[in-house]
Structure formats: C-alpha cells, structure tokens
Amino acid sequence: MADPRRRSIPSEVRAAWLFVGPGLAIIFLFFLLPIAAALLLSLTDFDLYAVADWRNLRLVGFENYSHLLRDRLFWQAMRNTFYFVLVGGPLTVMVSLAAALMIQSKLTRFPGIFRTAFFAPAVTTLVAIAAVWRYLYHPQFGLLNHALGWFGIAPIDWLGDTRWAMPAIILLSIWKNFGANMIILAAGLQSIPESLYEAARLEGAGWWRQLRDVTLPMLAPTFLFVAVMTCIGYFQLFAEPFVLTRQGEPLNSTLSVALLMYKEGFRFWHMGYAAAVAFILFLVILAATTLQVRLAKGREA
Amino acid sequence: MKKPLTSLLLHAALIAGAVLTLLPLVWMIMASLMPTGEASSEPPPFFPSHVTFDHYRELFVHLNIGRVLFNSALLAVSVTVLSVLLNAMAGYAFAKLRFPGRGKIFGFLLGALVLPAQVAILPLFLLMRQLGLVGSYWGVILPGMATIFGIFLVRQYALSIPDELLDAARIDGASEVRIFAEIILPLCRPVLVTLAIFTFLGTWNDFFWPLVVLADDAKYTLPVALANLFGEHVQDTELMMAGSVLTVMPVLLLFLFLQRHYVQGLLMGGLKE
C-alpha cells in the first residue's frame, strides 16, 4: 500500500491538481512571472508615458544597462550596498555566533530568558524601529552620544556625517537581525554529539581547541545557511535607509541599490531603467550566493 | 578550576547583551509617555517626569491611527488565513498525493526559493495596475496568498503522515476533500500554527510592497503610515514613539505568547539543508 511508486489513480491525480492548483497559480502569477517580466521590462524605455498608455512603449535593447554603467549614482549605490553587505554581514553573523555560543554554554543559567531578550528585535517592525534609532542617534539628545560621553568621546553626528551614516545603519541591522540567526546557530550547536567533545577533552583540548576542532567544523553547514541568508537579505537593504537616513542621505552615502530602484521606478517612473537596476541586483545576489556555496564546498574537499 | 570566574564573565556578557538589546524598546515606551518636548532635553531623560497618554490620544483623535491599525490587522489576518489554507493544500499534495510531474515541479519551486522578491516588484506593480488593484487591499492580499516557503514547510511536515491512514479513509469512502479537512488539517496543526505566526508577523511588518501598492492613505498599514508620519512629524519625538509602540507592541506580544511555535518554525526553515 505504501509503495511510493504505486501507479497514480485518476481520482487522486484530480484531487492533487485541485490542491496544488491555487497555490501554484498565485506563485506563478505574482512571483515567477513578474521576475521573468523584470528582464523584459529592463529592455524597454517604459516611463511615465508608457504608464499612461502602453503604446508608447519601445524596445531599446541593452540601452538601459549601458546607461546604468555610466551612471555615477548607480555605482555609488552599488558601493554602499557592498559596504553594507561586506561589513555588516560578517559582523552580524559573528555577533549571532557569539550569542549562540553563550546561550548554549552549559554554564549559562536561565538561557530561555536571554534567548527571548536577544530574539525580541527580530520580530519588531523595521520602520518603527528605524524611527526609534533615529532619535537614539540624535547628535545632541540621543542616548548613544550621551553614553559615549561617559567615556569622553565627543558627540558624533551619526546620521548627518557621510562617514558615520552607514556604520549607523549597520549597527541597527546587527541589533535587529542577530537574534534570528542565533536561534538557528544554537540549534546547530545542540545537534553536535557530546561524545565528540568528550573525545577532544580526553586528548587534552582546551576551550579554544574544542571550538576550533569540534564546534566550528561541525557547525559549518548551519553556518553556511545563516551566512547565505544574511547575505541575500542584506543585498536587498531598503527600509533602513528609507526611514533612518531619509532615503539615502547624507549626500547619497546610504543610498542602496534597492532604494535607487524604488526612486527611479516609483518616483520618476523610469520603470525600464529601474528594472535594469533590479536585474543587476538579482545577478549580484545570484553570484554572491554561488560564490559562498562554492567556497564552502572547496574548503570541505 | 576557574569555572566560577568564567561563569561570572559569561553572565556579565549575557546581561550586558540583554540590556543593550532591550534598551531601545524600553526607551521607545518611556519616550512615548513623556510630555511633549521632554525627550529633546539635556541630559536626555530615560524616564518620563510624569506619564502622559496625550500622544496616543493625538494619534487616535487627529491622525486616524485607528483606521491604520484596522488596515494592518485586516490585511495580516486575511493573508494569514488564506495563505495557510493554500499552502497547506499544496504542501499536503506535494507530500502525499501522486500526480505526474510532482517531483519536477517541486524541485523547480525549491530552486526559485532563492529568488529575491524585490526583483518582482516593478512588473508586479504594473500587473496590479492593469488589474485595477493598486490602492486596494487585494493588491497586498493576492500576492501573499501562497508562498514557496510555506508550501515547503507543510510538505516536510506532512511527509511523516502514514499512507495507511489515508488509504484506510479512502477505502471507507471518504472523498479527498474530506480527508484533507478532517485528517490532514488536524494532524498538521503544529506546522500550521508556526506558519500562521510567521505569515502574520511578515505581513504586519512588511513595508516595501504595501508602500508601493496601497497608494491611498485610507488603506495604509502601520509601517507605511508611520514612515509618512515621520516625514511630517520628525520633530515630535514623543508622538513618533507612541506610533512606534502601537506598531511594534502587537507583534511583540504575539511573539512573547507564542514564541515556542515561532522559534520552531524558524528552525524548520533553518535546518532544511
């Protein structure tokens, strides 16, 4: 009866299509089709006139892309996004790992309380939280500069200084995101067999060597998953600079690629051009994900 | 042994971490209760000199936040109910019903799991515009009604349901719809609860897509309305914090009460490799 290769029964097949049909239709129509259409859209000059009447639409080949590669704002958005991903990503994952190691430590009392506290930011609404942090970062009345003052550090204009605006966004993002990663890493830690640690201890391995020789290698697959998901999410940076630094200020130092796409597409109605931005972002994310997985595989071999 | 010292340092780090993590949230609540202008004084106060609910009143009476709260709740509940149903149906079929092309379609969906949603936004907007759904609740509900992640989550769970159970029901003459409604749904309850919490939080917190497609003040959700309010009232720290509290508190409380289920879902997503 339970043979998975049993011949399919017509009534079962009909029921199956009835069950998968609606879900597949939604995903195809509102997710897969638009992604494919983004490529087509990027080959047109879709703008305000085309929004009004589709007959004003022209195919322009790769003109949007060649224009984009000469656009200084695009390169700045690319640089900012890579800054955020390459600095913010590893920092977030490091903090997540440290938190996971701490709450999973056998010495820790009441790990549940700390887990809840660390995880709380992950469920909050980014827009509301970005508003909160905007006041915490206030150069004169913000608690952050006030606290730094105790250590004799002069007030920093976090959101008004081109050098500090991106670090401010990164700090907020670490705070918001480390808890979710921590939960996943903690589960990975929990699944490492205790016998491996016992064996290491018998060989006289201390805390550091146990971490290096047992914990980290065993955690590698979970770690890779967390790193890839963080990376994909961080490349799509949008709401943080939208609210915290008022759409990419100061002087576009926090303008992300997604924010540029939003402005081009929904502010100026340069839909074709914005689609080209989106598609390049897509390729970058794909390349980054592939690279991470390749690197991890290479190290295993 | 230096265990006591290690333990002391460990707990000091944990407590410091917890304080830093919770501080912004606690300050948000404190500032929302301060009299107007108090948060912008030196040195910055942490506790209100006296507690006032004026800013909440202002939000409800003059800024129509009640309507916005209603929009957020309506959309989050609608998307959650509909998507849990459609994802459960599809996830169950992929796990338990045999039909030609099942493996191929599912493999294709898994591959598409890494596609970034933002890439779809521009054409999706044009599609919604063509359908006349820009500025309507359906603009948010329709695309949220099924997700690859949700289908995947239910399928993994439903795989463990024994075939004998379903076959026995079929022999008894139960229809496929009845089997789904009376056997599968109750058995999948844990994963459906997880999925429901996930979807509710995701829809409540979503910003980019509602910002684009809701194009009508009367339909705005909390994050969109809050971002708008922020543009006009950036100087009113206490008012903005009251708005932030109203936005964050419902999801934070939901999480505190249901955190076990939520965390489970996160792990199912995280350990799928």
Image: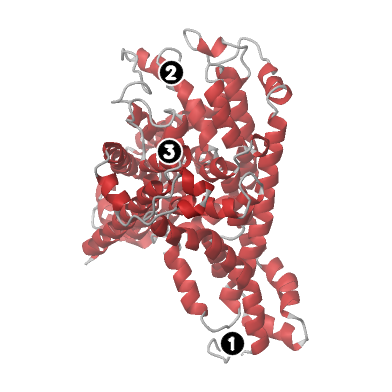
Element carrying mark 3 = helix
Which residue was labeled with disc 2?
A138
Which residue was labeled with disc 1?
A2
Q: Do the residues bearing badges 3 and 2 touch, measured as CB atoms within 8 Å?
A: no
Q: Nearer the viewer, mark 3 or mark 1?
A: 3
Whether residue B169 is situated above or below residue B88 in the rendered picture: below
Whether residue A130 is situated above or below residue A286 in the rendered picture: above
Q: Residue A226, image x and y in percent?
A: 39, 52
Which residue was labeled with disc 3?
A263
The answer to which of marks 1 and 2 sits earlier in the sequence is: 1
**Residue A198 lies in what quarter of the image?**
bottom left
Closer to the camera in the image, B108 or A119: B108
Q: Residue at x 55, y 22 (%)?
A: B232
Query: Horizontally, is B55 left or right of B128 in the view?
Result: right
Q: Residue at x 49, y 62 (%)?
A: A33
- Disc 2 marks a residue whose amino acid type is His
Q: Chain of mark 2?
A: A
- Disc 1 marks a residue whose amino acid type is Ala
